[in-house]
Amino acid sequence: MWVPFYNRNVLNKELARSSFSWEAIRWWEAAKVYIADERRAHHDESLYSESEAFAKAMQKYEPPLSRADVKDFLAEEKTLETEKPYTFTQSAHAKKNAASI
């Protein structure tokens, strides 16, 4: 979502690096095989190209990741809880008022 803003120099480079580089690099490394398969399947090397450019730009600031690093990252991501979508619930007072209208 924010990658095009970075690539078009709309987003502050230092802010982007400090805020997003850690995750971007790890997700890119984790998804490389999938993305290569998608590019081949769709005959389109440009798929995910903005994400690739961002990840490559961010890799300048970190040492290369090992397979174990990526595996550990994905294992940690798997333990994260999914945020429940926001749902509007009416209070008892609001329900009473709505019923009287």
Image (spheres, rainbow, N blue to C red):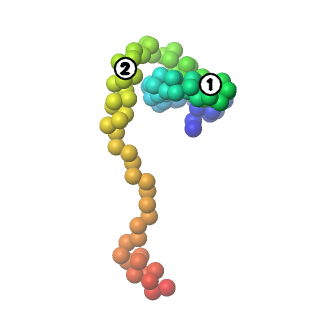
User: In the rendered structure, which disc, 2 or 1, sits on the residue that comes first in sequence?
Assistant: 1
Q: Residue at x 34, y 43 (%)?
A: 81
Task: Kindly indicate the quadrant of the structure image that contains residue 90.
Answer: bottom left
Q: Residue furthest bottom?
A: 100
- The local crowd at label 2, few if under 14, some if 14 to 19, many if 20 or more residues have their Cα within 10 Å, is some
Specify the quadrant that holds the N terminus: top right
Residue at image position (45%, 86%) is: 100
Residue 85 drawn above or below residue 61: below
Q: Picture coordinates of residue 18 (x, y %)?
A: 47, 27
**Which image quadrant is residue 23 in?**
top left
Mark whose residue sits in front, 2 or 1: 1
What percent of the width, then of the height, locates residue 53?
A: 60, 22
Picture layout, residue 60 above or below residue 98? above
Q: Nearer the viewer, residue 25 or 58?
A: 25
User: Relative to residue 91, is residue 50 drawn left or right?
Assistant: right
Query: Alpha-carbon distance for marks 2 and 1?
Result: 27 Å
- Residue 19: mark: none
Residue tagged 2: 69
- At 37% from the left and 34% from the top, the residue drawn is 77
Q: Residue at x 47, y 28 (%)?
A: 27
Q: What residue type is disc 1 on? A: Arg
> Badge 1 is on which residue?
40
Q: Position of residue 85 (x, y in %)?
A: 43, 54
Q: Nearer the viewer, residue 16 or 101?
A: 101
SS at circle 2: helix
Q: Is residue 14 above or below residue 64?
A: below
Residue count near mark 1 (Cα–Cα under 10 Å), binned few <14, some 14–19, many ≥20: few
